[in-house]
């Protein structure tokens, strides 16, 4: 359900990134668009709701729950930071940035 | 009366290839037109220190600071660098000391793509000890 990414998000290209081999079923994906809006499963969430969702996930599945931030290449760092801060507040420490290793034509 | 011997002549049935080739070309052009290469995704780790874990008592290794600015420029230990020189420098550091700490300082208005680019270059150089800082 969470795999569907907002089609407006253009991921940054990183050719040397580690390819995704196995997925953790606990993984939470946060989408950050170019305007700085944060989405979980295509639903826009504010900083407070985001924080409570991550806290609940950390309490339920553990603080090693991986968080994948799928940020738009043009998103400002401040909006990525908002997403990261929610993770820090919840004590979640496994954060990954999703990037495009190879762009399809 | 001489009887004429009747030779049975078996004629091989001719296969009309034109229609088959036509269909084959239609299928080929359909697949070529509709083929869409898939984007290959990757992840860049920015693991933070595990809460409750004590800091290691190892001697501190060399610390490198890379700052990313809103205009897309970056500095390496306060020296302005382009992508190629930064990549070369990080590779040299990676070859000598894989445990070197890289502190990436992002300004609030800097683009996320630039952060991913620097993380990618660090990963390519084999540097895994990365800290991320935000500055205003």
Image (spheres, coloured by chain):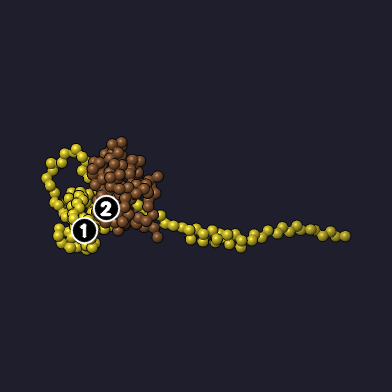
Chain colours: A brown, B yellow
Q: Residue at x 26, y 45 (%)?
A: A86
Q: Nearer the viewer, residue A91 or B124?
A: A91
Q: Residue at x 76, y 58 (%)?
A: B7
Element at label 2: helix
Give how far across and how far down residue A2 sits, in percent: 37, 46
* Rendering quarter of residue A65: top left
Q: Is residue B30 above or below residue A2?
A: below
Q: Which residue is mark 2?
A: A79
**Front label number (2 vs 1):** 2
Q: Is residue A36 left or right of residue B100?
A: right
* Rendering quarter of residue A10: bottom left
Q: Residue at x 19, y 51 (%)?
A: B133
Residue at the extreme right: B1
Q: Which residue is mark 1?
A: B68
Element at label 1: strand
Q: Nearer the viewer, residue B57 or B135?
A: B135
Q: Quadrant of the N terminus of chain A?
A: top left
Q: Nearer the viewer, residue B72 or B22?
A: B72
Give how far across and how far down residue B123 sits, in percent: 25, 52
Distance from the alpha carbon under mark 2 to that under mark 1: 15 Å
């Amino acid at each position: 359900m969470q795999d569907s990414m907002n089609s407006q998000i253009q991921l940054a290209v990183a050719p040397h990134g580690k390819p995704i081999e196995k997925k953790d079923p606990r993984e939470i994906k946060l989408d950050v668009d170019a305007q700085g809006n944060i989405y979980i499963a295509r639903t826009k969430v504010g900083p407070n709701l985001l924080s409570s969702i991550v806290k609940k996930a950390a309490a339920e599945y553990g603080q090693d729950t991986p968080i994948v931030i799928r940020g738009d290449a043009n998103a400002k760092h401040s909006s990525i930071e908002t997403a990261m801060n929610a993770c820090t507040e919840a004590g979640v420490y496994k954060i990954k940035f999703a990037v495009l290793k190879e762009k399809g034509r | 009366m001489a009887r004429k011997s009747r030779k049975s002549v078996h004629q091989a049935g001719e296969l009309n290839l034109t229609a088959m080739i036509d269909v084959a070309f239609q299928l080929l052009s359909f697949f070529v037109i509709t083929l869409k290469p898939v984007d290959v995704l990757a992840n860049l780790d920015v693991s933070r220190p595990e809460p409750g874990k004590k800091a290691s008592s190892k001697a501190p290794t060399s610390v490198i600071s890379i700052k990313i600015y809103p205009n897309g420029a970056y500095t390496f230990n306060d020296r302005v660098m382009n992508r190629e020189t930064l990549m070369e420098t990080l590779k040299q550091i990676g070859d000598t000391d894989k445990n070197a700490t890289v502190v990436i300082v992002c300004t609030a208005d800097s683009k996320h793509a630039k952060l991913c680019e620097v993380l990618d270059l660090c990963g390519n150089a084999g540097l895994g000890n990365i800290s991320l800082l935000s500055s205003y």
